[in-house]
Amino acid sequence: MTIPDSIRRVVSWVTPMSAVSISVLKPDEIVIKPHQKKVDWDQVWENIRKSRAISSKGKISAAEFLEQDRRSH
């Protein structure tokens, strides 16, 4: 779908190859929204650092834990 430059100048999230969701609210109205909001990468990396700092008291590896966890639900 081609989005006119006049719209691209007004909204910053409309970039080439950006993921969007398209909804039909009324027969004559189509709504386009960004698929994913901006990710706070600083927070993501902080959470990764925190998770790495937790020592395991179990007798299985992290990979085995993840496998068991995913199979449980």
Image (cartoon, rainbow, N blue to C red):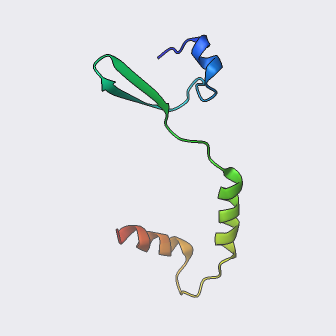
Q: Which quadrant is home to the C terminus?
A: bottom left
Q: Is residue 67 left or right of residue 38?
A: left
Q: Which residue is depicted at the point 56% across and 26% down?
A: 17
The percent position of residue 57, horizontal first and vertical second, equals 58, 88
Rendered location of residue 1, percent (x, y) = 46, 17
Does 8 sit above or below residue 35?
above
Vertical order, 41 against 51 (above or below): above
Residue occupying image coordinates x 60% and y 83%: 56
Above/below status of 62 relative to 4: below
Name the quadrant containing residue 8: top right
> Could you tell me which residue is drawn at 69 percent across and 58 percent down?
45
Front residue of 10/72: it is 10
Q: x and y percent of residue 64 in the render?
A: 49, 74
Q: Nearer the viewer, residue 56 or 15?
A: 15
What x and y, as percent, mark residue 33? 48, 31
Foreground: 43 or 24? 24
Q: Residue at x 30, y 23 (%)?
A: 26
Farthest left residue?
A: 27
In this rendering, position of residue 42 left or right of residue 34: right
Q: How many marks?
A: 0
